[in-house]
Image (cartoon, grey):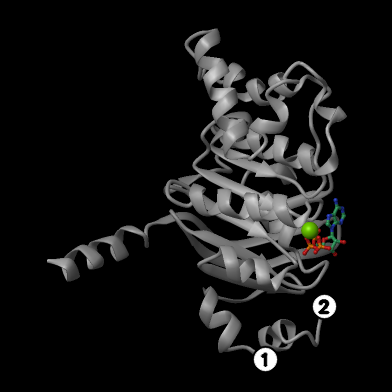
Amino acid sequence: MNDMRLTERAVESQTTKITARGVQVYYADTHAIKDVDVDILDKTVTAFIGPSGCGKSTFLRCINRMNDSIPIARVEGDILIDGQDIYDRRVDPVQLRAKVGMVFQKPNPFPKSIYDNVAYGPKIHGLAQDKADLDGIVENALRRAALWEEAKDRLQSPGTGLSGGQQQRLCIARAVATSPEVLLMDEPCSALDPIATAQVEELIDDLRQNYSVVIVTHSMQQAARVSQKTAFFHLGNLVEYGETGKIFTSPEDPRTESYISGRIG
Ligand SMILES: Nc1ncnc2c1ncn2[C@@H]1O[C@H](COP(=O)(O)OP(=O)(O)OP(=O)(O)O)[C@@H](O)[C@H]1O
Ligand SMILES: [Mg+2]
Protein backbone atom coordinates (compact mmCIF):
# COMPACT_ATOMS: atom_id res chain seq x y z
CA MET A 1 0.00 0.00 0.00
CA ASN A 2 2.69 2.40 1.06
CA ASP A 3 4.80 1.40 -1.87
CA MET A 4 1.94 2.00 -4.24
CA ARG A 5 1.33 5.46 -2.83
CA LEU A 6 4.98 6.28 -3.26
CA THR A 7 4.91 5.11 -6.85
CA GLU A 8 1.84 7.18 -7.60
CA ARG A 9 3.42 10.24 -6.10
CA ALA A 10 6.59 9.69 -8.05
CA VAL A 11 4.61 9.46 -11.27
CA GLU A 12 2.53 12.50 -10.42
CA SER A 13 5.61 14.60 -9.72
CA GLN A 14 7.10 13.68 -13.10
CA THR A 15 4.44 15.55 -15.11
CA THR A 16 6.03 17.78 -17.70
CA LYS A 17 4.96 21.41 -17.50
CA ILE A 18 7.25 23.07 -20.04
CA THR A 19 8.59 21.43 -23.18
CA ALA A 20 11.30 23.10 -25.26
CA ARG A 21 12.37 21.66 -28.59
CA GLY A 22 15.06 23.00 -30.89
CA VAL A 23 15.07 26.42 -29.24
CA GLN A 24 17.46 28.93 -30.76
CA VAL A 25 17.81 32.56 -29.74
CA TYR A 26 19.72 35.15 -31.71
CA TYR A 27 20.48 38.76 -30.79
CA ALA A 28 21.22 40.13 -34.25
CA ASP A 29 24.25 37.94 -35.14
CA THR A 30 24.91 36.58 -31.65
CA HIS A 31 23.69 33.00 -31.33
CA ALA A 32 22.83 33.04 -27.63
CA ILE A 33 20.84 29.79 -27.28
CA LYS A 34 21.76 26.82 -29.41
CA ASP A 35 19.23 24.12 -30.16
CA VAL A 36 17.97 23.55 -26.64
CA ASP A 37 15.64 20.63 -25.86
CA VAL A 38 14.37 20.26 -22.33
CA ASP A 39 11.34 19.02 -20.38
CA ILE A 40 10.76 21.01 -17.20
CA LEU A 41 8.61 19.29 -14.63
CA ASP A 42 5.57 20.47 -12.75
CA LYS A 43 5.72 20.69 -8.95
CA THR A 44 9.49 20.86 -9.15
CA VAL A 45 12.17 23.50 -8.69
CA THR A 46 14.61 23.55 -11.59
CA ALA A 47 17.89 25.46 -11.26
CA PHE A 48 19.63 26.97 -14.29
CA ILE A 49 23.34 27.27 -13.65
CA GLY A 50 26.38 28.14 -15.76
CA PRO A 51 29.00 30.83 -16.33
CA SER A 52 28.07 34.45 -16.97
CA GLY A 53 26.90 35.02 -20.55
CA CYS A 54 26.02 31.36 -21.21
CA GLY A 55 22.36 32.17 -21.89
CA LYS A 56 20.52 31.41 -18.66
CA SER A 57 18.51 34.64 -18.60
CA THR A 58 17.92 34.46 -22.33
CA PHE A 59 16.44 30.98 -22.10
CA LEU A 60 14.41 31.89 -19.02
CA ARG A 61 12.91 34.85 -20.89
CA CYS A 62 11.80 32.54 -23.70
CA ILE A 63 9.41 30.83 -21.28
CA ASN A 64 7.19 33.89 -20.83
CA ARG A 65 8.04 35.62 -24.09
CA MET A 66 9.97 38.43 -22.45
CA ASN A 67 12.38 38.35 -25.40
CA ASP A 68 9.48 39.69 -27.51
CA SER A 69 10.27 43.11 -26.09
CA ILE A 70 13.93 43.00 -27.23
CA PRO A 71 13.78 44.17 -30.86
CA ILE A 72 16.99 42.43 -31.99
CA ALA A 73 16.07 39.12 -30.33
CA ARG A 74 14.80 36.27 -32.51
CA VAL A 75 13.45 33.06 -30.99
CA GLU A 76 13.10 29.85 -33.04
CA GLY A 77 11.90 26.37 -32.14
CA ASP A 78 9.01 25.33 -29.93
CA ILE A 79 8.09 26.03 -26.34
CA LEU A 80 4.97 24.38 -25.01
CA ILE A 81 3.31 24.82 -21.63
CA ASP A 82 0.82 22.07 -20.82
CA GLY A 83 1.19 21.03 -24.45
CA GLN A 84 0.22 24.47 -25.81
CA ASP A 85 2.56 26.42 -28.05
CA ILE A 86 3.15 29.71 -26.23
CA TYR A 87 4.45 31.36 -29.42
CA ASP A 88 1.18 30.67 -31.23
CA ARG A 89 -0.25 33.87 -32.72
CA ARG A 90 -3.42 33.40 -30.70
CA VAL A 91 -1.56 33.55 -27.38
CA ASP A 92 -1.74 36.93 -25.68
CA PRO A 93 1.65 37.57 -24.00
CA VAL A 94 -0.04 39.55 -21.20
CA GLN A 95 -2.29 36.60 -20.34
CA LEU A 96 0.68 34.28 -20.65
CA ARG A 97 2.67 36.34 -18.15
CA ALA A 98 -0.11 36.07 -15.55
CA LYS A 99 0.28 32.30 -15.83
CA VAL A 100 4.08 32.45 -16.09
CA GLY A 101 5.28 34.97 -13.52
CA MET A 102 8.78 36.37 -13.45
CA VAL A 103 11.08 37.88 -10.86
CA PHE A 104 14.18 39.68 -12.09
CA GLN A 105 17.63 40.08 -10.63
CA LYS A 106 17.17 43.82 -10.07
CA PRO A 107 13.96 44.60 -8.21
CA ASN A 108 11.71 46.70 -10.45
CA PRO A 109 8.64 47.81 -8.50
CA PHE A 110 6.12 49.96 -10.35
CA PRO A 111 6.05 53.64 -9.32
CA LYS A 112 2.94 52.91 -7.27
CA SER A 113 2.09 52.13 -3.67
CA ILE A 114 3.08 48.82 -2.12
CA TYR A 115 -0.58 47.80 -2.20
CA ASP A 116 -1.05 48.74 -5.85
CA ASN A 117 2.12 46.94 -6.92
CA VAL A 118 0.65 43.68 -5.66
CA ALA A 119 -2.98 44.45 -6.59
CA TYR A 120 -2.13 45.43 -10.18
CA GLY A 121 -2.05 41.91 -11.70
CA PRO A 122 -5.13 40.56 -9.90
CA LYS A 123 -7.00 43.76 -10.94
CA ILE A 124 -6.18 43.64 -14.65
CA HIS A 125 -6.93 39.92 -14.79
CA GLY A 126 -10.19 40.30 -12.83
CA LEU A 127 -9.14 37.86 -10.10
CA ALA A 128 -10.85 39.67 -7.19
CA GLN A 129 -14.62 39.79 -6.56
CA ASP A 130 -14.51 42.99 -4.53
CA LYS A 131 -12.26 45.21 -2.42
CA ALA A 132 -12.21 42.81 0.54
CA ASP A 133 -11.24 39.96 -1.76
CA LEU A 134 -8.46 42.07 -3.30
CA ASP A 135 -7.23 43.05 0.18
CA GLY A 136 -7.02 39.35 1.01
CA ILE A 137 -5.08 38.54 -2.16
CA VAL A 138 -2.63 41.37 -1.44
CA GLU A 139 -2.11 40.29 2.16
CA ASN A 140 -1.66 36.66 1.21
CA ALA A 141 0.87 37.49 -1.51
CA LEU A 142 2.82 39.76 0.85
CA ARG A 143 2.81 37.03 3.48
CA ARG A 144 4.07 34.45 1.00
CA ALA A 145 6.88 36.80 0.04
CA ALA A 146 7.78 37.31 3.71
CA LEU A 147 7.08 41.06 3.50
CA TRP A 148 3.74 41.40 5.28
CA GLU A 149 5.07 42.26 8.73
CA GLU A 150 7.27 45.02 7.36
CA ALA A 151 4.71 46.37 4.90
CA LYS A 152 1.32 46.08 6.60
CA ASP A 153 1.46 49.53 8.21
CA ARG A 154 2.69 51.30 5.08
CA LEU A 155 0.68 49.72 2.27
CA GLN A 156 -0.05 53.11 0.73
CA SER A 157 3.63 54.19 0.66
CA PRO A 158 5.52 53.96 -2.63
CA GLY A 159 7.05 50.57 -3.42
CA THR A 160 10.18 52.32 -4.58
CA GLY A 161 10.67 53.64 -1.03
CA LEU A 162 11.46 50.16 0.29
CA SER A 163 15.00 48.83 0.76
CA GLY A 164 16.49 46.75 -2.07
CA GLY A 165 15.74 43.46 -0.37
CA GLN A 166 12.21 44.58 0.52
CA GLN A 167 11.66 45.70 -3.09
CA GLN A 168 12.69 42.25 -4.28
CA ARG A 169 10.23 40.61 -1.92
CA LEU A 170 7.59 43.06 -3.19
CA CYS A 171 8.32 41.89 -6.73
CA ILE A 172 7.95 38.29 -5.60
CA ALA A 173 4.61 39.19 -3.96
CA ARG A 174 3.55 40.85 -7.22
CA ALA A 175 4.50 37.74 -9.19
CA VAL A 176 2.67 35.28 -6.92
CA ALA A 177 -0.44 37.50 -6.58
CA THR A 178 -1.86 36.24 -9.87
CA SER A 179 -1.36 32.61 -8.74
CA PRO A 180 0.92 31.75 -11.64
CA GLU A 181 1.44 28.12 -12.66
CA VAL A 182 5.07 28.73 -13.51
CA LEU A 183 7.39 31.09 -11.67
CA LEU A 184 10.61 32.18 -13.34
CA MET A 185 13.21 33.70 -11.04
CA ASP A 186 16.40 35.25 -12.41
CA GLU A 187 18.91 35.42 -9.56
CA PRO A 188 16.14 36.54 -7.20
CA CYS A 189 18.32 36.60 -4.10
CA SER A 190 21.30 38.57 -5.35
CA ALA A 191 20.02 41.75 -3.62
CA LEU A 192 18.97 39.98 -0.43
CA ASP A 193 20.64 39.48 2.93
CA PRO A 194 20.98 35.93 4.32
CA ILE A 195 17.74 36.18 6.33
CA ALA A 196 15.64 37.35 3.39
CA THR A 197 17.40 34.77 1.18
CA ALA A 198 16.40 32.01 3.58
CA GLN A 199 12.81 33.32 3.55
CA VAL A 200 12.72 33.37 -0.24
CA GLU A 201 14.17 29.85 -0.40
CA GLU A 202 11.45 28.72 1.98
CA LEU A 203 8.85 30.38 -0.25
CA ILE A 204 10.30 28.62 -3.30
CA ASP A 205 10.01 25.29 -1.55
CA ASP A 206 6.44 26.12 -0.61
CA LEU A 207 5.54 27.15 -4.17
CA ARG A 208 6.83 23.83 -5.43
CA GLN A 209 3.75 22.13 -3.97
CA ASN A 210 1.66 23.70 -6.70
CA TYR A 211 3.89 25.25 -9.30
CA SER A 212 6.80 24.72 -11.58
CA VAL A 213 9.59 27.03 -10.42
CA VAL A 214 12.68 27.81 -12.50
CA ILE A 215 15.47 29.67 -10.76
CA VAL A 216 18.70 31.04 -12.21
CA THR A 217 21.40 31.17 -9.61
CA HIS A 218 25.15 31.64 -9.40
CA SER A 219 25.15 30.02 -5.98
CA MET A 220 25.82 26.29 -6.09
CA GLN A 221 24.73 26.10 -2.47
CA GLN A 222 21.42 27.69 -3.35
CA ALA A 223 20.88 25.40 -6.32
CA ALA A 224 21.62 22.41 -4.13
CA ARG A 225 19.32 23.67 -1.36
CA VAL A 226 16.25 24.59 -3.38
CA SER A 227 16.18 22.56 -6.58
CA GLN A 228 15.39 19.00 -7.49
CA LYS A 229 16.52 19.35 -11.11
CA THR A 230 19.48 21.28 -12.46
CA ALA A 231 20.31 22.40 -15.99
CA PHE A 232 23.88 23.41 -16.76
CA PHE A 233 24.33 25.86 -19.63
CA HIS A 234 27.62 26.63 -21.34
CA LEU A 235 28.16 28.94 -24.34
CA GLY A 236 24.47 28.77 -25.29
CA ASN A 237 24.26 24.98 -25.06
CA LEU A 238 22.30 23.02 -22.50
CA VAL A 239 25.17 20.72 -21.64
CA GLU A 240 23.60 18.62 -18.93
CA TYR A 241 20.24 18.30 -17.25
CA GLY A 242 19.25 15.95 -14.48
CA GLU A 243 18.68 15.35 -10.81
CA THR A 244 20.37 18.10 -8.80
CA GLY A 245 22.11 15.58 -6.54
CA LYS A 246 23.52 13.78 -9.55
CA ILE A 247 24.68 16.96 -11.33
CA PHE A 248 26.53 18.09 -8.23
CA THR A 249 28.10 14.78 -7.26
CA SER A 250 28.67 12.84 -10.46
CA PRO A 251 28.08 14.92 -13.59
CA GLU A 252 28.45 13.19 -16.95
CA ASP A 253 30.05 16.03 -18.89
CA PRO A 254 33.55 17.36 -18.18
CA ARG A 255 32.30 20.93 -18.69
CA THR A 256 29.75 20.48 -15.89
CA GLU A 257 32.41 18.93 -13.71
CA SER A 258 34.77 21.87 -14.33
CA TYR A 259 32.09 24.42 -13.57
CA ILE A 260 30.82 22.91 -10.37
CA SER A 261 34.34 22.39 -9.12
CA GLY A 262 35.09 26.04 -9.83
CA ARG A 263 37.43 25.79 -12.80
CA ILE A 264 35.31 27.70 -15.32
CA GLY A 265 32.96 30.63 -14.93
N1 LIG B 1 19.46 42.40 -24.92
C1 LIG B 1 20.55 41.83 -25.47
N2 LIG B 1 21.08 42.32 -26.61
C2 LIG B 1 22.16 41.74 -27.17
N3 LIG B 1 22.79 40.67 -26.67
C3 LIG B 1 22.32 40.15 -25.54
C4 LIG B 1 21.18 40.69 -24.88
N4 LIG B 1 20.94 39.97 -23.76
C5 LIG B 1 21.89 39.01 -23.73
N5 LIG B 1 22.72 39.12 -24.79
C6 LIG B 1 23.86 38.22 -25.09
O1 LIG B 1 23.40 36.88 -25.09
C7 LIG B 1 24.33 36.04 -24.42
C8 LIG B 1 23.64 35.36 -23.24
O2 LIG B 1 23.33 36.36 -22.27
P1 LIG B 1 22.46 36.06 -20.98
O3 LIG B 1 22.14 37.38 -20.36
O4 LIG B 1 21.33 35.19 -21.34
O5 LIG B 1 23.50 35.25 -20.08
P2 LIG B 1 23.41 34.77 -18.57
O6 LIG B 1 23.78 33.33 -18.56
O7 LIG B 1 22.10 35.15 -17.99
O8 LIG B 1 24.59 35.59 -17.88
P3 LIG B 1 24.70 36.22 -16.38
O9 LIG B 1 25.02 35.05 -15.50
O10 LIG B 1 25.85 37.16 -16.49
O11 LIG B 1 23.41 36.89 -16.05
C9 LIG B 1 25.51 36.91 -24.04
O12 LIG B 1 26.48 36.82 -25.07
C10 LIG B 1 24.91 38.30 -24.00
O13 LIG B 1 25.88 39.28 -24.29
MG1 LIG C 1 21.52 36.46 -16.48
Look at the numbered discs 1 and 2 and tell me whether their residues touch, using CB distance below 8 Å.
Answer: no
- As drawn, the label of residue 254 is 1
Question: Can you tell which quarter of the image residue 144 is in?
Answer: top right
Rendered-image quadrant of the N terminus:
bottom left
The x, y position of residue 133, in whole percent, is 50, 15
Query: Can residue 21 be seen in this snapshot?
Result: no
Q: Is residue 113 left or right of residue 238?
A: right
Left or right: 171, with 95 as reference point: right
Q: How many marks?
A: 2
Camera-nearest residue between 193 and 123: 193
Residue receiving disc 2: 265
Local secondary structure at mark 2: loop
Seen from the viewer's position, the closer of residues 192 and 181 is 192
Residue that sits furthest to the left in the current view: 1
| Camera-side residue of 166 and 18 | 166
From the top left corner, tell me how far across and down residue 185 is, in percent.
67, 51
Graded by Cα atoms within 10 Å as few (under 14), some (14 to 19) or many (20 or more), the crowding at tag 1 reads few
- Name the residue: 67% across, 54% down: 60
Q: Inspect this view and state whether residue 67 appears.
A: yes
Q: Quadrant of the C terminus?
A: bottom right
